[in-house]
Amino acid sequence: MRKSIFIALVSLFLAIFLISCGSKNQDDPSQPNQSGQTDKSSLPQLSVLVDLPSVNGGSVDDFFSYVPGNGKDFLIITETLPPEGQERSAALTRIRTEILAGKGPDVFICTCWVPGFGEEGLFKFPNQAMENRIFLPLDDYISGAKYMEWDRLLPVVMEAGRGREGQMLLPLAYRFDVFLLDRGRFSSSVEFPATWDELAESGDKLARSLAGYVTPYDMMGELADYDKDVPAFSEDDLFEYMKKVLDHLKKVQSESIVPIFLNFSDSKFNGPDYTMDLLKGREFDFFSTYNKDGGITADITTFGGINRNSTHPDEAFTVLDFLLNRDVQKGFTIYSAMHSLPTHMDLYSNEYPAHGQAMSEEHFESFSKLRDQINVAKFYTPLEGAMLGITAEFDFKNGTEDELRKIVHKHYMEMSMMLAES
């Protein structure tokens, strides 16, 4: 029932938004088509593939009904991939075959492969897919965009969608660790940002604690050298860092300061104990974990792209352009799924709430300064899963150095094979 209410609210919001853009004019293409006004059978059909297993299908269809021009200038036909099992495997094989044959959907809206959330995505390695000329270059379209505000989309995240031919993919949502600590109870003498090694070796308790919360695949930064189709680091480097991380965890597990993990998902579904409702009436400092190069790693969870073979590229771009509009980002569920953040930099401020939540001016300034420390933005891929396999297989309490080396070797070879075959 809560989802139904949420979907209805999103519908109402989008309707109000379109009215404010002048949708009172019956000829406005942003209005859903009224029965009898247009012969839909004569409209160009725009196929949109939706691979968002974490998003309720009804809310996706609701969004498409308000895409400007849909039902009047063109007709959006959607296909939603099954979330799991043999049906999903069969659908992935079919669509990949169609793409290789120069066919396939006009628009892709996809969730990345996220460790622990569902199965592999349609494009296991988006960077490789960009270089394989699957997607349409978008720079010329972006320069004439009607709905997105390109200069207000987080540059370091959007840059991840650039290939040799320019902007090929549009990251839609991303995540990074945001921790809260009561300002009156905790403080640190360390100057941030800092490298992971500096935090782990610091005499400052808070710094050491933050180093203990790092996820290894984020601590290593970018995991692949896509120009060479090999891991971005040597096996020895991976072993040394994994050994450092595991040794550090043993040292700090009894003394770590426990922060609050800030969840950006909708409070109506998660409860006040896990969302920004915590910020009301309290003063927090914002922290994150840091990678080996001295910045924060952001992981892209959702992206959109256009098939290079699309016969309707202008209409296809309209879908993505509208999807990245600030007012769509602040209410559509893909921008808060899996603790994700929208790419528009103004959202979650007091002036521009998102998903029913907002920060005070002071808190948003602290959050923005933390966000500015992102130095790596990467798509989730199966490489993250291989990295997680190391910590999953190693006996944290009783494992030996030799056992760790064998496990690292196994998963490093797995990563190397994945990239060679991608």
Image (cartoon, grey):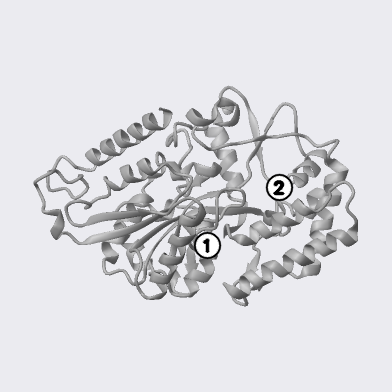
- Looking at the picture, does residue 98 appear above or below residue 250? below
Question: x and y percent of residue 157 in the render?
Answer: 52, 56
Viewer-side residue, 164 vs 283: 164
User: Is tag 1's residue or tag 2's residue first in the polypeptide sequence?
Assistant: 1
- Looking at the picture, does residue 249 appear above or below residue 150? above
Q: Quadrant of the C terminus?
A: bottom right
* Badge 1 amino acid: Ala
Contact between labelled residues 2 and 1, with CB atoms less than 8 Å apart: no
Viewer-side residue, 129 vs 349: 129
Q: Quadrant of residue 9?
A: top left
Nearer mark to the viewer, of 1 and 2:
1
Question: x and y percent of residue 172 in the render?
Answer: 45, 52
Residue 116 visible, this angle: yes
Report which residue position mark 1 lands on: 160
* Badge 2 amino acid: Phe
Q: Residue at x 55, y 31 (%)?
A: 276
Report which residue position mark 2 lands on: 192
Q: Residue at x 27, y 35 (%)?
A: 16
Label 2: state its secondary structure: loop
Viewer-side residue, 221 vs 107: 107
Question: x and y percent of residue 124 in the render?
Answer: 54, 63
Question: x and y percent of residue 306 in the render?
Answer: 37, 64
Most extreme residue toward the left is 36
Residue 203 visible, this angle: no
Q: Is residue 371 left or right of residue 20?
A: right
Q: Residue at x 60, y 39 (%)?
A: 366
Q: Is residue 405 left or right of residue 317?
A: right
